[in-house]
Amino acid sequence: MKRFWISLVIALGIGCDRSAIAQTKIYTPIPLTPSDEIKDRLSENDIPTGQGNFARDYSIQLQSGDQVSIDLSSDNFDTIVTLMTAKGETVAENDDGPDGTTNSLLFTRITKSGNYVVRVKAFGETPGGPFKLKLTKLKPAN
């Protein structure tokens, strides 16, 4: 009988913080297609970073030897773009691009084929806003 009551309490959420129950959302990065510009929005509904800001993740398959450019821009927040392995290890990151703005431009060469994550986030304590993201595979020089 004790097991029944414990199961009932768990099922009904009695004595539980309901916000903890609501946070069972499964982590699934958004697929990213090379050369397509994405227009999206970073908000408080995205991944909390623990630093007062939020992140949104995109997944892409890259091959060893790929040279990529990742361009992230926003008129509403200071952008940071990070390229990570599927295990969350940072491959490369950029805060401010070479044009003197707070937009981000990242160039890197892929050394290992696999699934990667492009993380978009805002610098500082800000929820974000609209942004544009584009990953381009660059052709190697001959």
Image: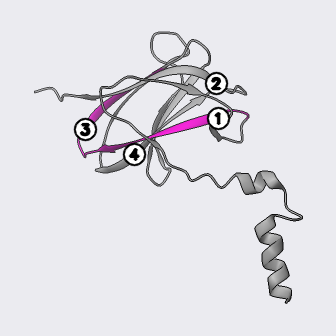
Mark number displayed over residue 128: 2
| Residue that label 1 marks | 54
CB-based contact (under 8 Å), mark 1 and mark 2: yes
- Is residue 10 or residue 61 the one in the foreground? 10
Residue 119: percent from left, percent from top:
50, 37
| Residue that label 4 marks | 116
Q: Main secondary structure of the magenta part?
A: strand
Highlighted range, magenta: 52-72
Residue 66 falls within the magenta-colored stretch? yes
Q: Earlier in the sequence, mark 1 or mark 2?
A: 1
| Residue that label 3 marks | 66
Name the residue at 30% across, 26% down.
Answer: 35
Q: Nearer the viewer, mark 2 or mark 4?
A: 2
The local secondary structure at tag 3 comes to loop
Residue 61 as seen in the image, left or right of residue 21: left
The local secondary structure at tag 2 comes to loop
Residue 17: percent from left, percent from top:
84, 56
Q: Earlier in the sequence, mark 4 or mark 3?
A: 3
The local secondary structure at tag 1 comes to strand
Residue 27: percent from left, percent from top:
55, 51
Residue 33 as seen in the image, left or right of residue 28: left
- Specify the quadrant that holds the N terminus: bottom right
Q: Nearer the viewer, mark 1 or mark 3?
A: 1
Q: Earlier in the sequence, mark 2 or mark 4?
A: 4
Mark 2 is surrounded, within 10 Å at the Cα level, by few (under 14), some (14 to 19) or many (20 or more) other residues, namely many
Name the residue at 10% across, 27% down.
Answer: 142
Give residue 124's quadrant in the image: top right
The amino acid beneath tag 1 is Phe
Q: Is residue 104 above or below residue 82?
A: above
